[in-house]
Amino acid sequence: MKPYSSFVPEKYHNFPILEYLHLRFPYYSASDWGRHCHEGRVKRNGYVLCADDFVLKGDLISYTPEDKTFSEPTVNAKYKILYDSHQFLIVDKPANLPVHPAGKYRTQTLLNFLKADLNSEEIFPVHRLDRETSGIMVFAKNKEWQLYLQSAFEKRLVKKEYEVLVYGKFPIELEAIGFIGKEENSIVRKKQKYSPYGFPNSKESETHFSLIHYSQEKDISHLKVYPRTGRVHQIRATLYSLGYPVLGDKLYGKDESFFLSFAKTGDTSGFVESLGHTRQALHATYLEFGDNVSDHKYSFHLPFPDELSLLLN
């Protein structure tokens, strides 16, 4: 089979090869990567690597896959179509379902399920939700509407609302206007951070938070969230940086080692006591956008899930 290749970024300089491979390509466990090294499937600059080797900045790492079917993790495929027109679909996405192929998830995605169930390749993503985030999404059914909706998101013409559970007593209202960018101190390459001040390679971010309810007994706040920009992990990273981690969040929770453990094993059974839930308690509740040829406004609402509301009781 054709090998896959990539260069080692500077941040992974002098990392053990198995740790590097698992962090960058988590569709295999560290032990699986060790087996692939032993079988000669992993090379550095054209030479076979041993499982106890280290990688250096700029190394070309190549991997030749096994000639067999890849087994993907189980997902929750119980999505619902809430609205279906000639131009777009409104979908209720459950937690534990990725929207697009990424990492260890190649075919078990919402986009692939929609195309298969509707027997159409004319389903186009417009925005995204994280795999563990549930709630309302829109998909275009033609290229014209995909471009229109993507432009509407970029121009902040789409109204979005979320609800979330966080640890701590949150203020009644909070306006987080600042910047989001890569968290350089994290070994998880996709982790972001929020700051009221700009920093290298950061982008402007704006999120409004409103307190719905505070449970003194649980020390948990239920919030309404109004993101005005659409940065990667914007809500979760902002709350984490403000000191109010989201319940169940493995990456932006109390300790990112939970994320690394989950990426390695896929097991969440021991997370509830430490993180409060098996998945992040974030739900997209509302979308509103205009028609592309008229003044008509489309609006769609989903209630906060019972499984999350019960965490307050």
Image (tube, grey):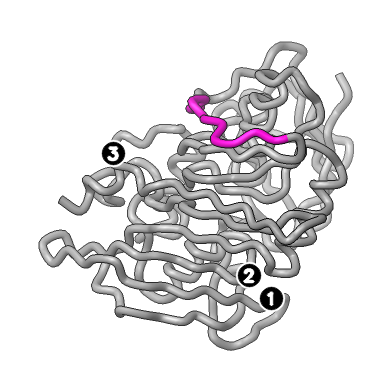
x 83%, y 38%: residue: 142
Nearer to the camera, 245 or 104: 245
Cα–Cα span, label 1 and label 3: 35 Å
- Please tell me in which quadrant of the rendered image residue 171 appears: bottom left
> Along the horizontal axis of the image, is 197 left or right of 275?
right
> Quick check: marks 2 and 1 in contact, CB under 8 Å?
yes
- Residue position marked by numbered label 2 in the rendering: 229
Please tell me whether mark 1 or mark 3 is closer to you in this view: 1
Q: In the image shown, does 119 or 205 lie closer to the viewer?
A: 119
Label 3 or label 2, whichever lies nearer to me, is 2
Looking at the image, can residue 69 be seen? yes
Q: Secondary structure at mark 3?
A: loop
Image position of 286 (left or right of 156): left
As for residue 83 lying within the magenta part, the answer is: yes
Q: Is residue 296 above or below residue 80?
A: below
Find the residue positioned furthest to the bottom.
197
The magenta segment is 75-85
- Count of number-bearing discs: 3
* Real-space CA distance between mark 2 and mark 1, rounded to the nearest whole angstrom: 10 Å
Residue at mark 1: 203
Which percent across, then down, holds residue 285?
Answer: 46, 52
Q: Secondary structure at mark 2?
A: loop
Circle 3 residue: 270
The amino acid on which the numbered mark 2 sits, given as a three-letter code, is Thr
Image location (x, y in percent) of residue 127: 68, 50
Query: Callout 3, which amino acid?
Result: Gly
- Which of the 4 image quadrants contains residue 197? bottom right
Q: Secondary structure at mark 1?
A: strand
Whichever of callouts 2 and 1 sits on the residue coming sooner in the sequence is 1
Task: Judge whether residue 37 can be spotted in this image.
Answer: no
Q: Quadrant of the N terminus?
A: top right
Asked if labels 2 and 3 touch by Cβ distance under 8 angstroms, the answer is no
